[in-house]
Amino acid sequence: MTSPGPVAETAAIRLQLRTWPEVEAYLDRCRGVIVPLGSTEQHGPTGAIGTDALTAEAVALEVGRRTGVLVTPAQSFGMAEHHLGFPGTVSLQPSTLLAVLHDVVLSLARHGFERIFVINGHGGNIATTRAAFAEAYATAASRGLPVAGRLRCRLANWFTAGPVMREARELYGEKEGHHATPSEIALTLHLEPSLQAHQRPLPEPAPAGPIHGPDDFRRRHPDGRMGSDPYLARPDHGARFLDVAAAALAAELEAFLAED
Ligand code: NI
């Protein structure tokens, strides 16, 4: 399977801006597609509700720009049940998200896409996404889709890519924390400068711990953060995170496309 090669413009790789004959022609030269997956949930008292969706989409578009692989619209609602104690959070139950991702994969597979590369911005989506892949493989086979034997789905979490985690550790050490992390907030500051106005020093956060549901989460983490200091985030850090995340994931995608 060959990659279509680098393209200059982000518009060229956005599925939303292409026509169906263009997609049909694309499938003659590449069977890969990127699906950005986010979440719409509280990110502490100063972080944007859309952090996980904004970051996943930005990384996905940059990976698409570097590789020439098409990027679908972002799935901006994820599994955020444990964040529902905070206003503005919009969550899909795991079974709902599983059904959504299953149907996205099956739609793409029906038209001949064989490599589905999900770029994810939210840890709470991981288990459900893996389950959705398993169910999609089974359905593709039971429906007798021509691509069933060649269909591969890959989950790529931008925030756990090796170079991203190394960069975050160097910049923030322990203050990276586990939710509303300075690394993800930095990327949103780079993408949307108006968010800088929310930045202010915050008291010591509650440490990370077990989560048993939305009310328990809010009791243990009253301001929504888990062990993080998002005040350390800076827009120039965000530009750096975008670059290292896109480099790591573009390499992973190229290998994925070349896999047997
Ligand atoms: Ni997040």
Image: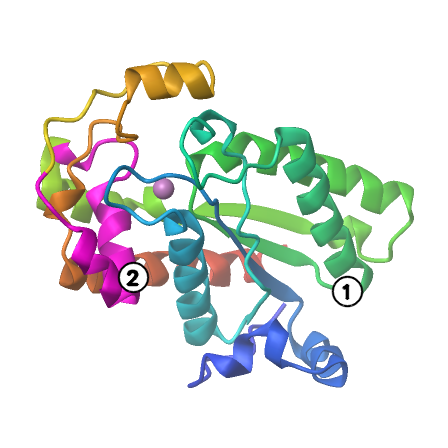
Q: Quarter for ligand 1? A: top left
Quarter of the figure that contains the C terminus: bottom right
Under circle 2, the secondary element is helix
Q: Could you give the CA–CA distance between mark 1 and mark 2, rounded to whole angstroms?
A: 30 Å
Of the numbered discs 1 and 2, the one sitting upstream in the chain is 1
| Residue at image location 38% in from the left, 55% down from the top | 55
Under circle 1, the secondary element is loop
Q: Give the residues drawn in magenta, as a range.
A: 175-201
| Residue at image location 72% in from the left, 83% down from the top | 25
| Residue at image location 53% in from the left, 51% down from the top | 76
Residue 250 in view in this figure: no
Q: Nearer the viewer, residue 254 or 88?
A: 88
Instruction: Classify residue 23 as left or right of residue 73.
Output: right
Locate residue 217: give its quadrant: top left
Q: Residues within 10 Å of mark 2 (few under 14, many from 20)?
A: many
| Percent position of residue 82, x then y | 46, 25
| Percent position of residue 30, x then y | 64, 72
Query: How many numbered callouts?
Result: 2
Which residue corresponds to mark 1?
A: 112
Q: Amino acid at mark 1?
A: Gly
Quarter of the figure that contains the N terminus: bottom right
CB-based contact (under 8 Å), mark 1 and mark 2: no
Instruction: Classify residue 144 as left or right of residue 180.
Output: right
Q: Nearer the viewer, residue 210 or 106?
A: 210
| Percent position of residue 8, x then y | 42, 86
Q: Tell me: is circle 2 under 8 Å from ligand 1.
A: no
194 to 21, vertically: above or below: above
Mark closer to the observer (1, 2): 2
Locate residue 165: give its quadrant: top left
Q: Is residue 134 covered in magenta?
A: no
